[in-house]
Image (cartoon, rainbow, N blue to C red):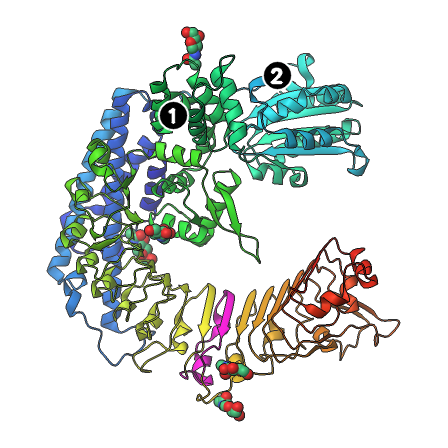
Amino acid sequence: MADALIYVLLERLASTTYEYIEGGVKLVLNVKEDVKKFTRTLRVIQAVLEDAEQRQVTDQAVKIWLDELKDVSYQMVDVLDEWNTNILRQQVEKQEREGDPNALVTKKKVRFSSFTRYFRLGKVSRVILRHDIALKIKDLNDKLTEIYEERKKYQFLSKELGIQQPQQPQRPQTASFVDISEIFGRENEKKVLITNLLSDSSAEGKGFLIIPIVGMGGMGKTTLTQLAYNDDRVKTHFDLRKWVCVSDPFDEIKIAKAIIGKNAPNSNELDEVLQCMCTSIQGKRFLLVLDDVWTDDPKKWEQLKVPLIQNGAKGNRILVTTRKHEVADMMRATRNKINLGELNDECCLSIFNHMAFLDRDVHEFGDISKEIVKKCKGLPLAAKTLGSLMQNKTKMGEWKEVLHSKIWDLEKVEQEVFQPLFLSYNDLAPTIKCCLLYCATFPKDYQFERDDLIKLWMAQDYVISKGNKEKETTGYAVFDNLVARSFFQDFEKDFDTGTITSCKMHDIVHDFVQFFTKNECLIIDHGEETTSEPKVFGDKVRHLTLRYVPEGPLPLFISSYDCKNLRTLATFNSRITTIDPNLILQLKCLRTLNLSFNPIEELPKEIGELIHLRHIDLSSNPILKKLPDTICGLYNLSTLRLMYCSGLTKLPENMGNLINLKHLYVKYCGLLESFPKVIGRLTSLQTLDACSWGGDKDEAFQIGDLRNLNLEGSLEIQLGGDATDKSEVEKAQLWDKKLFNLRVNFAGRTNSSSSSSVEILNALRPHPDLESLEILEHNGTTWPNWIQSLHNLRFLTVAWGTLCEFWPLGKLECLERLAIFGIEGMKKVGVEFLRLEHQTSFRIRLFPKLKRLHFYHMSNWEEWEGVEEWTKEDSEITIMPCLSELRIGDCELLKALPDFIFKTPLRTLDITKCRRLAEHYEEGSGERAKISAKIPNIRISSG
Ligand SMILES: *[C@@H]1O[C@H](CO)[C@@H](O)[C@H](O)[C@H]1NC(C)=O
Ligand SMILES: *[C@@H]1O[C@H](CO)[C@@H](O)[C@H](O)[C@H]1NC(C)=O
Ligand SMILES: *[C@@H]1O[C@H](CO)[C@@H](O)[C@H](O)[C@H]1NC(C)=O
Ligand SMILES: *[C@@H]1O[C@H](CO)[C@@H](O)[C@H](O)[C@H]1NC(C)=O
Ligand SMILES: *[C@@H]1O[C@H](CO)[C@@H](O)[C@H](O)[C@H]1NC(C)=O
């Protein structure tokens, strides 16, 4: 892990600013020079890290050396942070002094008294502080120099000096013979695969087919491929079969030579070798297996692919095994992809028994076997390894020992099961390694929310963005990367966009990351702190997760160890009620604090001393009433989560000082009636998940105060009460905000404001790039006047209101999903829905991209008009040419569907609780027969 950490540190060092640190410090010491020296030394050390990382496994002295190096690096990160915070503080103070022109004028003067100590340092103390930082840097420099000198003892191989490339970890070479012990449980996949290999090629373009088999390490990709390769039908079907173990790097010459076989030329000229390869496959029907492909570089692949396509006969097949979905994408073969997921426990048990007992009595330790197999979590390799581990164990005690041990304590598992994972891990970029390993701070089976996880990575500074790219964008890329390499699974996707919103981690992968972070990430269950050996909780722990802490104070045992280095403190399933201020004061390096779900009434004001904090989660705490004002001195705080704090009555008044706050979550805080007006000054704010406009206009946040915020993502505007009028709403200037989703909810609006709801809606005109819009409880009959300008709108929901004229939607050229709920007043959907009235052209496409159309809860809706009766004969109207799903529910009176629906490529028709429709399309009727012939999936019911 040191390589990743140091990579991140070097990036930060390179972007350090010095401008504000001038003055006092310069007189005392030369900080800039010291930092440069530090950087130089670190770079030299970086060159030997790869070798050191590998040797630490066997060499204790190297491990200690590496630990020291990590220590110094972590400390340097902290010093840099302190420095940055110092700079920030000066900026805030300057702003206060000069009066920020953008700042909202508040009548009350911002009060500092309660936290003067935290950021109103006099000139003298400021110099002392900088002096302090300078000394720390000097000190760290000395330490690093020592480490640098010491490295000579170990004679590491250096990457840069080019003495010798450090050894790549061994990738197992596969061969095409089958290990009979592994054939359990993939019958279906095998059948599909063999069918694809033998199938008539005429349907597939040139009769050339690439079949990728994708899955995480140890899932049995190679085994399945071997089975197919050696199947008798396959053997006779192909003139030529070749098995090439590709691995990394992707070497075209080597692969081409392997295809040619024993007559391969000695030349290393790509052209010549490819020529020769072409001759050898000329006119033959071949099966080529490329086992364990890692590269997703299309250039390398094309060079090989083109001659293969051009020279073989029809019916050629290339089988590719890989752990990376990117490889299948790059080969443009996702359609034929075979995903290998987990095996069920039964199959795992068969493998386990086969390996464990060979010819002996299988039932010897029946139940224990089953329990042990559960540890495999569907990973055939683990079943095989554990099974073979048991071969020579004949005593019940020995079996129980294995059952109760952590999986990575079994040396065999570490070697055999983690080895393939290690290869995947090693293939990651350093910062992505950090991100992956951070997942070890969560318990097994935790459901990771993508966006939260990315924020947590950012809080630890693991996400580095080059150029102008937003860090979030890089964070998404990191996440996608880990997904594509099968480190995550069990995805939940956004209904509309299909992007992954959450996922889990396979247990064995989780074991793997925990194994890798054994000293740095620790999860302690209540009661365990006394039993687990204290040695594991030394000063190397950086991320601590507590579970099952009973009602009472945050346990002091964490302070009986050295917890000044903690960067993450999180709790799960705990009921902490109080926190000792002195304990808080020790957590000086904390970046992330997650105390959600704990019933803590009051947070100690000392939290304001934890200047490195970036991410605070206090959500789901029903008795928290307020936050200490000192929290407003945490200049680098970027995420504050307070959802479901149902007792929270107010936010701190000085929140305007949190100039780095990007995400504020306050949804479901029922008692939070107004926000302080200064929130309008938080120009970094991207996420504000709920807004409230109660209270005094001059002191409380109003809708117009949204103006200066740089909101992104989703925004929900609740137009409750009577606090809104048109001119105030206009001030928000929503059209300037690059939102993805806007939800406007009129629920709870009273009719005493001076503007009608249509006027308000009109004033809420969003940016033309808006992609998703929801309008709820809008009691007006006209649509907002900007709806037609939303040229990028993809998803639209209109629910619970009186909006029943359908004129403006057919021309929204990007609309993919339309959902209409609970418009009780609607009796008829007429042709105006299609917007046909004023057509001038005869070639019209209406709802050109619409895929999903949903209607629910419209108890008065009777008629949905078609177009047959009135279209002119020579007109060409295309309606909903992409429609694939129509769902209608709770529309009792609707009589029939319009004719045009049956001209769309509809695949799913789902009708529930629609009495008359059910009668109309009754099973066995002529109408039913007509639609059944066209639509593959139909469900129609009246109940
Ligand atoms: C704190 O925020 C500032 C301003 O965004 C940033 O430049 C700085 O790097 C942050 N400090 C740390 C320690 O990350
Ligand atoms: C079990 O014992 C036999 C004979 O002593 C040995 O050859 C074999 O390698 C052992 N197997 C394992 C898995 O340790
Ligand atoms: C904080 O911890 C809770 C469990 O106590 C968890 O559900 C939540 O996802 C965590 N929050 C973050 C941001 O990780
Ligand atoms: C909208 O109209 C419905 C019935 O017509 C009524 O019950 C509801 O209170 C109205 N909502 C608002 C916000 O005016
Ligand atoms: C209030 O309701 C009345 C009657 O329904 C309507 O005429 C008037 O326009 C409404 N006022 C506002 C401000 O919406």
Q: Find residue 238 and report its horizontal and vertical position in percent.
A: 76, 22
Considering only vertical position in the picture, is 890 above or below 475? below
In this image, 300 relative to 417: left or right? Answer: right
Q: Residues within 10 Å of mark 1 (few under 14, many from 20)?
A: few
Judging depth in this view, the residue of 173 and 547 nearest the camera is 547
Considering only vertical position in the picture, is 578 above or below 351? below
Ligand 1 image-quadrant field: bottom left
Picture quadrant where residue 439 is located = top left
Mark count: 2
Helix, strand or loop at label 2? It is loop
In this image, 832 relative to 341: left or right? Answer: right
Instruction: Specify whether residue 728 is painted magenta.
Output: yes
Considering only vertical position in the picture, is 732 above or below 568? below
Q: Find residue 322 and report its horizontal and vertical position in percent.
A: 57, 32
Q: Residue furthest left?
A: 124
- Looking at the rendered image, the quarter that the C terminus falls into is bottom right
Magenta range is 722-749
- Residue occupying the point 41% across, 45% down: 446
- Residue occupying the point 48% across, 69% down: 737
Q: Is mark 2 within 8 Å of ligand 2?
A: no
Q: Which residue is mark 2?
A: 177
Q: Find residue 720 and report its horizontal and vertical position in percent.
A: 43, 78
- Single out the mark in the foreground, 2 or 1: 2
Point out the tag, 2 or 1, that comes first from the N-terminus: 1
Q: Residue flagged by tag 1: what amino acid is it?
A: Leu
Q: Find residue 619 and report its horizontal and vertical position in percent.
A: 33, 59
Q: Which residue is mark 1?
A: 161
Judging depth in this view, the residue of 854 and 630 nearest the camera is 854
In this image, 704 relative to 645: left or right? Answer: right
Q: Residue flagged by tag 2: what amino acid is it?
A: Phe
Instruction: Specify whether residue 657 is painted magenta.
Output: no
